[in-house]
Image (tube, rainbow, N blue to C red):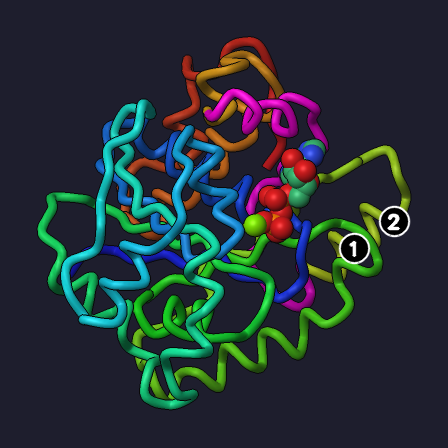
Amino acid sequence: MKKVVSVVNLKGGVGKTTTAVNLAACWGEIGKKVLLVDMDPQGSASISVGVMNEGNELLEALQNTSELPVVPTEVPGVDLVPSGMALATTGLWFTEDAGNDLLAQCLEQTRGDWDLVIIDCPPSLGFQTMNSLMACQHVLVPVETSFLGLNGLKQMVAAIESFKSKNRDIKIEAVIPCRAQRRRRIHWDIMDSLNEMFPRKVSPIIRENVSLVEAPRHGKPVILTDRVSKGADDYRIVTLWLDERICEMQDSTEDRLVGFLPQNKYEF
Ligand SMILES: Nc1ncnc2c1ncn2[C@@H]1O[C@H](COP(=O)(O)OP(=O)(O)O)[C@@H](O)[C@H]1O
Ligand SMILES: [Mg+2]
């Protein structure tokens, strides 16, 4: 079975799309074949890899439980299922219960040799996120290292855990601290709380970095717009950390980093 990863947080603006797009690119960079699925009607992940779309084909695929519309991207190793505003009309087409495993069925129908499927979710527990949770085995939760970022996390985790009755394979694989600012005291307080709430599941941090904000404007992930930047480095490190867990790599992240990022020193 393909490894399917959903990037989920019910809060908006925490770094879900940035994480989905840049992890896809970094996995592509280390030789994995990745299918990035945009399940957000805003289509931000699509735009971030240079694709504008209305989302009609994705909506149709879900309606017919048929093969997903896959387009190539300029990001090495990464294909995309693009989304757009049409996906916001799912409420009109699907009843609450009938439609939870439609994406899972569409993925089954979709032929391709991807190692990983990464799904970017919108900030709500609606049709799109429910379908993503049904289709995946691994959940990644980006969190902002601010007080409000932590607020509501417990309820969201409980909601995902309760999903186990519908999808036995689902597991919160990692919590990814995003937009981290280590010089702020609250950062360390939040990191302590996260480590307490999610022992061994808190990934290395993604620092606040302007290159990550600018990259989508060029329709590219940060490793292609600003190859040597904190943003690129941080997402490469988190990718290796996740690769070890999700793809069961034998070598540890620390071993694989030797000679990979010579310009900096990292703490784990
Ligand atoms: N590490 C980061 N440093 C600086 N800005 C970031 C970082 N991660 C995300 N952002 C910015 O924060 C905003 C929200 O990020 P986004 O990934 O779209 O969040 P979400 O998908 O959860 O709504 C975007 O403008 C994005 O460029
Ligand atoms: Mg988003």
Residue 216 in sight here: yes
Which residue position is annotated with label 2? Answer: 186
Left or right: 108 in relation to 73: left
Q: Position of residue 139 (x, y in %)?
A: 44, 62
Task: Estimate the spatial distance between the alpha carbons at disc 2 and disc 1, rounded to whole Å.
Answer: 6 Å
Mark 2 lies on a secondary structure that is: helix
User: Residue 190: percent from the left, percent from the top?
Assistant: 78, 55
Residue 33, above or below 188: above
Indicate the amino acid at tag 1: Ile
Kindly identify the residue that appears in the image at 55 percent across and 29 percent down: 216
The image quadrant of residue 46 is: top left
Asked if labels 1 and 2 touch by Cβ distance under 8 angstroms, the answer is yes
Please tell me whether residue 248 is drawn above or below residue 32 in the rendered image. below
| 218 up-or-down from 185: above or below | above
Q: Pick the quarter of the image with the N terminus.
A: bottom left
In this view of the protein, which residue sits in the foreground, 221 or 182? 221
* Mark 1 CB lies closer than 8 A to ligand 1: no
Ligand 1 within 8 Å of the CB at mark 2? no
The magenta segment: 195-219
